[in-house]
Amino acid sequence: MTDRWKNRPEGSEWGEHGADDELGRVNLITPEKVLQGVAEVKEGRTFSLSLPLDYPGGNILNVRRHPPRWEPTYLDGQPYINFPLKRLDGQNTDVVSDDQVTICLQYSTQWDALSHVGSFFDADSDGTDEKVYFNGYRAGEHVIGPRSYDGEATTDSQNAAQRLGIQNFARHGMQGRGVLIDLEAHVGRARTYVGFDQLSEIMQADGVEVERGDMVVFRTGFADEILSMNRTPSKERLENSCAVLDGRDERLLEWVSDSGAAALIADNYAVEGIPPRPKDGPRPMLPLHHHCLFKLGLPLAELWYLSELANWLRENRRNRFLLTAPPLNLPGAVGSPATPVATV
């Protein structure tokens, strides 16, 4: 119990790492876990795990998210690309280029901050649901937007996540041991909702073990589908390709809790299947996001490029590696691009 909440969701980890904790399961990425990751480096070979930032292309995958928009910076209205500094002083010999970009922070390879998904929940134990995030942080107080959607005054806040922002992960470092589960190798690229039973069979077949503090990485082949469409994605292919986790499978959610995983990462969109399997009554539309971000404080990451790493690991009968994947140190953001690197 804290000043923010008297009641926490069943099965949640609110308060487990302190009353004001903003890292959640990332706390499990300890110096010991970093050393375990370093111990997996045998060859000194690195793999880039990021898509180009202008993929998937368009906004079919998510209508709110658009590709980066590039332009030069300007000096007195003049574009600063191939700019001769002798225009400022005739003795200068420099030629300078400088640019800028407007970007949706969760367009391509990305991390979700814990402020990305919250829920209506009676944290005050007064019979009324409030809009809250992990560890009881409140919408309108700790996560602020220009519109409240509940009759309160709008704000001019330029810093949405006063708490639970992505900068917390950046400052922690997000480096430790990664463990890869190769779903594509077992189910191909057909749209498959993977639940606990099937996941357990795949892990057993490949000798995969997840330990407390590991960052768990799922390869489905979805990023390869995106790359093959060359920035002109097909809605039909996007919606019908590759494995997704079944967020409605309660046993799968129990496995996530019991595994001690510090992060779930995938090369697909959202890690879980959207839409989820039908369920009547009040329920989250994003059940895995709800379980991980809202209840456990367990970050999700999406749209990573994993095939070269996954193929190498399979060829060498390995599934563990050193993962280095800090997001941008951008205070107040609810998500961030990432340029992860795996070292084996």
Image (cartoon, grey):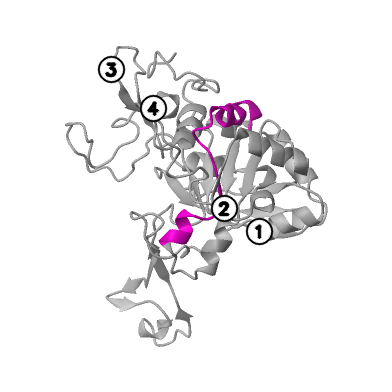
The answer to whether marks 4 and 1 mark residues whose Cβ atoms lie closer than 8 Å is no
Residue position marked by numbered label 2 in the rendering: 267
Sequence-wise first label, 2 or 1: 2
Is 136 in front, or is 284?
A: 284
- Residue 79 position by quadrant: bottom left
Observer-nearest residue: 47 or 181? 181
Please name which of the two marks, 4 or 2, marks the residue nearer to the observer.
Answer: 2
Task: Identify the secondary structure beneath mark 3.
Answer: loop
> For mark 4, what is the residue?
137
Specify whether residue 29 is in view. Answer: no
Magenta segment range?
Answer: 235-261
Q: In the rendered structure, which disc, 4 or 3, sits on the residue that comes first in sequence? A: 3
Q: Residue at x 19, y 38 (%)?
A: 154
Marks 1 and 3, the one that precedes in the sequence: 3
Q: Is residue 16 magenta?
A: no
Q: How many numbered circles are shown?
A: 4
Location of residue 28 by image quarter: top right
Residue type beneath disc 4: Tyr
Which three-letter amino acid code belongs to the residue tagged 3? Thr
Is 224 left, or right, of 67 in this rendering? right
Residue 130 in view: yes
Residue 132, image x, y percentages = 36, 27
Distance, label 1 to label 3, CA atoms, is 47 Å
Residues marked 2 and 1 touching at CB (< 8 Å): yes
Mark closer to the observer (4, 1): 1
Horizontal and vertical percent position of residue 295: 48, 27
Q: Locate residue 178, reporting x and y percent.
A: 68, 44
Residue 176's place in the image compared with 90, above or below, is above
Secondary structure beneath label 1: helix
Residue 307, numbered circle: 1
Query: What amino acid is at disc 2?
Result: Asp
